[in-house]
Amino acid sequence: MLAGNTYYYTITPYDFHGNAGPAISEPASTGTGTVDGRRVGQRPTGSYWGGAGEQIDLMSGNLSYTLPLVTAVGRAGLKATFALAYNSQNWRVVTGYPRILSADTGFGFGWQFMLGAITAIYTGNGTVAYYIFTDATGAQYNLTLNNSGVWSSNQSTYVWYKGDTNTLYFRNGTFWVMGCVSAGGEQDAGTLYPTIVEDTNGNQIIITYMAGSGVNWNNSSSRITMIEDARATIPCPNGAGVPCSYTISYIPGTATTPPYLSGIVNYVNTGESYTVSVTPGQPLWARPRQRGFCEFRHGGDAGERAIHRPGLLLEFQLRLYDRRRRLDGSPIPPGRIPELDV
């Protein structure tokens, strides 16, 4: 489909017996601008399909899956749900080269476990161009409207970020203090995460994060270690006597892998306790599409083809047949079809 054109879609209804009804043809015009083909998470204005918890974006094709694990509860109805979320659009090819758009910060590549995040995008001279707000499903919204240091979006999300105080405001009056800044060797270094969720009455939910890779202070990674809400009465074993509602544990990291989620312990008798098994260091099964060139070589009766792409070499042999004989003239065995060797 090309921009600025009109296309016609023809819909023909059929019943279970194969009888066709009158066809309906409807025009559809494309706009003159461009649309970003990547759209992750679940937006309130998006259209999605899914039958078992998955949500497939009907515009971008992204597969989003969200699994809520714990819900922190404050007074007067204050709540915060923390979920594991996965999105499949993790790469983009730019002028023939892949760009990784996701990270593995301890939950698996493409997975996140968070309430939300803020990421600053800078210009070449080091000033903020805009901010990106990421919600718990991974949906991203550009906060490009700057009103005296208060950043907002025109993408149907009603949040306001005040950069000088690192505070994110919502239209119901609730706000987040973005007191965690991912640092050190973290793949998402510079991203901010909420440490305090507070409503208009001063009720709070407090979140503590693990130290980042290569640094020794807390609240410097995306890995949540402790959540405290209004129900907390039992001192956390890893919280220096501070009451908590949930603790989150991780297996130790290595020189090449981050600490990985291993479990969640619940201290408020709600049943939200989990044991997680992760096998770190696994290779990725999918690679981004890359442009390259092809060359053909011939050998015997097999047409050998090699596809060369940056970082990828795929060779296969294609044996070509006509209906009766191979190219070398020998007869085809009964029941044989063209072969593909990889």
Image: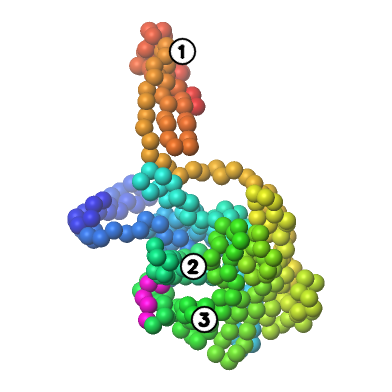
Residue at image mark 3: 165
Residue type, mark 3 in image: Thr
Residue ID at (53%, 84%): 174
Residue ID at (49%, 80%): 164
Q: Main secondary structure of the magenta part?
A: strand
Judged from the image, the secondary structure of the residue bearing numbered disc 3 is: loop
Q: Are marks 1 and 3 in contact (CB under 8 Å)?
A: no
Judge whether 53 appears above or below 240 on screen.
Answer: above
Q: Which residues are magenta?
A: 141-147
Question: Which numbered disc, 1 or 2, marks the residue that appears first in the sequence?
Answer: 2
Residue 184 falls left or right of residue 312? right
Q: Residue furthest bottom?
A: 201
Mark 2 surroundings within 10 Å by alpha-carbon count, few (fewer than 14), some (14 through 19), many (20 or more): many
Residue at image mark 1: 333
Residue 213 is situated, as x and y percent measured from the top left of the image, at: 65, 59
Q: Are marks 2 and 3 in contact (CB under 8 Å)?
A: no
Judge whether 230 appears above or below 89 on screen.
Answer: below
Foreground of the two, 332 or 334: 332
Q: Nearer the viewer, mark 1 or mark 3?
A: 3
Residue 139 is situated, as x and y percent measured from the top left of the image, at: 47, 65
